[in-house]
Image: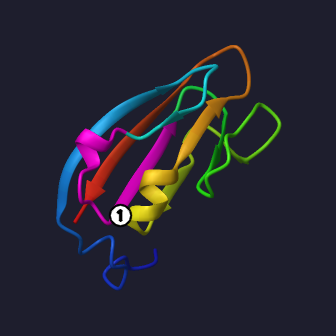
Amino acid sequence: MPSMMGDPLYQADFNAHESITVADSSIGLTAGTYGQSRAAFLTLETAQIRWTVDGTTPTTTVGHVANPNDTLTLKSSNQIARFRAIRTGGTSGTLKVSYAR
């Protein structure tokens, strides 16, 4: 098993968390929760989504695909602020998010 000790996120000071329901309208992360966080670790539960971090709005056919149990790491405050997601099918996804300073 690879060691996580060299990963900066492993050594991060996690300061907040939230659960986001990803439905049929594009949604971002909650600014009042992430505040000044500089990294985020996300785990997808329930259903497939599409996501972006470049300022564009994802659709059911545009954006990166994430499937249940996939993880995403956002490594800057800009990526956190610009993250958007939408579900691809009829079932909403749930993102579990932990934020780090």
11 is higher (above) or lower (below) than 59: below
Q: Position of residue 53 (x, y in %)?
A: 58, 55
Q: Where, by quadrant of the figure, is residue 48 drawn?
A: top right
In this picture, residue 81 sits left or right of residue 54:
left
Give the colouring mode of the picture: rainbow
Q: Residue at x 24, y 59 (%)?
A: 36
Amino acid type, label 1: Ala
Q: Position of residue 61 (x, y in %)?
A: 83, 36
Dividing the image into 4 quarters, which one contains the C terminus? bottom left
Q: Residue at x 41, y 68 (%)?
A: 76
Q: Nearer the viewer, residue 4 or 9?
A: 9
Which residue carries the number 1 mark? 39
In this picture, residue 58 sits left or right of residue 39:
right
Q: Nearer the viewer, residue 10 or 58?
A: 58
Chain part drawn in magenta: 30-44
58 is higher (above) or lower (below) than 8: above
Q: Residue at x 62, y 27 (%)?
A: 47
In this picture, residue 44 sits left or right of residue 80:
right
Q: Where, by quadrant of the figure, is residue 13 drawn?
A: bottom left
Q: Position of residue 10 (x, y in %)?
A: 30, 71
Q: Position of residue 28 (x, y in %)?
A: 48, 38
Q: Nearer the viewer, residue 5 or 41?
A: 41
41 is higher (above) or lower (below) than 66: below
